[in-house]
Amino acid sequence: EMAEKRMSRWYFGGIASCGAACCTHPLDLVKVHLQTQQEVKMRMVGMAMHVVKNDGVLALYNGLSASLCRQMSYSLTRFAIYETVRDMMGSGGQGPMPFYQKVLLGAFGVRNATGGCATFLCQPLDVIKTRLMNSKGEYRGVIHCLTETAKLGPLAFYKGLVPAGIRLIPHTVLTFVFLEQLRKYFGIRVVS
């Protein structure tokens, strides 16, 4: 009797990242509100309650479309690198990598590989996402926000390059949970 194995499909990384982004987006939105308040008046839970009370539950998902664009823009590349490194590390004959190693590789190894690059390239999209999340209806959409931000000069796209840690761990863990489930149920069948 042959054991059935399933391999990931090339686009699963993007789908898994989008799934994780849908879960962690409210955290991201609250982080943005906390970063943009003039003085520290509220902590995280207080800010979340404030957003819901003033604008409703769906306000926690403002800017989600920009967030999903960002995930798709670099996740596919990131996961191509991740899968290559994983296969190189896993081919040492000691069987598949433990889950925690996958998470660490995804969070640090991969981020630090397309990191200088991926963070630098994706920061403008992050800024656009932040501006859309914080907007009071002054932008018609992603492109309008992009052109308005561009008028402020190139450095406007690199505000907040350093802070972004609050959702890194839950986002990475959730991405790998989604990725493993996609591979398990929808992956390419490999008979070994």
Image: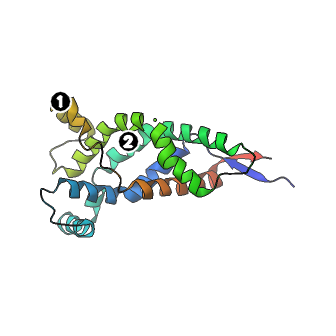
In the picture, the quarter occupied by the N terminus is bottom right
The front one of 66 and 104 is 104
The front one of 22 and 80 is 80
Color scheme of the displayed model: rainbow
**Residue beneath disc 2:** 69
Kindly indicate whether the residue at mark 1 contacts the one at mark 2 (C-beta within 8 angstroms).
Answer: no
Q: Residue 103: x percent and y percent?
A: 53, 53
Q: Name the residue rendered at 84%, 52% in the picture.
A: 2
Query: Quick one: label 2 or label 1, which is nearer the N terminus?
Result: 2
Asked if residue 179 can be seen in this view, the reply is no
Quote the CA–CA distance across marks 2 and 1.
23 Å
Q: Amino acid at mark 2?
A: Cys
170 relative to 50 in the view: left or right: right
**Residue beneath disc 1:** 153
The front one of 107 and 13 is 107
Q: Nearer the viewer, mark 2 or mark 1?
A: 1
